[in-house]
Image (spheres, rainbow, N blue to C red):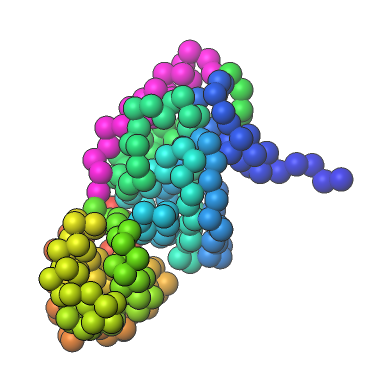
Amino acid sequence: MPPADPLETKLRHAITMVDGEPPLIAVTGKESVPRESVPHSHLPGQLLGLFSGLLTVRTGTGNWTIPTTHAVWIPSSVTHAARSHGPFAGWAVYVAPQSCVNLPPAPCAIRVSGLLRETVLRAAQWQVAPLSPARARVVQVLLDEVAAAPLDSLGLVLPREPRLLRIASALIAEPADARTLDAWASWANLAPRTLSRRFAVETGMSLTAWRQRVRLLRALELLAGGLPVTTVAFDLGYDNVSAFIALFRRTFGTTPGRYFAPGPAAI
């Protein structure tokens, strides 16, 4: 019988943590091909981040597409699934339930500081065992960094009302769909004013802004897969490449062509 893989052994410890030692377990890994997990949940909270590549995380309330500058926090027992876009190198921190008290109560995207990334790398080197005082201090720094990290708007909140969710799901499936608000309202058997008002209440965004966010998140996926900027713009329904580049730059602070370029973080 072959020896157990150290990473797999560590992951089994991580997802079965309850209360007690250790307060968290950190792991790192990489894949040369895309990877997707089925919807699942576990008692430990989980922070997912990347050293390279692009990752989409889905929950029942929203979707997040994150580059290397960000991470997604999934609280204890929240059902989630993840999918990478091409090869990636990533990391995960599993936090025991009693250590999640001061962390965000709902799934969210956070900006990853250099200190957070370095503490994750340090903790990922440890075996699963009770913590020394020095390691306990590193763990506290890591948890403090997660608690204090700025939340980011990379997420996509899903509406709960069935007809609104039907519209949202159709746009996620086909971001280039250019139907007007009136056309979507007719399709979902809603009054246009009701659609406009309730969509904003349930998602925090107008339907137009929400559709733009869908397109931009899909653009990140397509760009990570190596598609040219022009192809991405037209595939997502933009009338011209300049309009797409301008919106991308306003949102992410850099152009699509430079977003995945080697060097300093793009955002």
Q: Which residue is pictured at 50% across the width and 29% down the height?
A: 96
Which one is in front, 114 or 85?
85
* Residue 42 coordinates in the image, percent (x, y): 54, 41
Q: On the rendered image, what quadrant is the C terminus found in?
A: bottom left
Q: Which residue is pictured at 24% across the width and 57% down the height?
A: 202
Magenta stretch mostly in which secondary structure?
A: helix
Q: On the rendered image, what quadrant is the N terminus found in?
A: top right
Residue 41 placement, left or right of 191: right
Q: Quadrant of residue 251?
A: bottom left
- Asked whether residue 141 is drawn in magenta, I would say yes
Is 193 located above or below residue 45 in the figure?
A: below
Which one is in front, 212 or 231?
212
Outermost top residue: 133
* Residue 30 coordinates in the image, percent (x, y): 54, 53
Residue 115 visible, this orientation: no
Which one is in front, 2 or 192?
192
Q: Which residue is pictured at 27% across the width and 72% down the height?
A: 215
- Asked whether residue 215 is drawn in magenta, I would say no
* Residue 110 coordinates in the image, percent (x, y): 30, 44
What stretch of residues is rendered in magenta? Answer: 131-152
Residue 23 visible, this orientation: yes
* Residue 224 coordinates in the image, percent (x, y): 39, 68
Is 228 located above or below residue 101 in the figure?
A: below
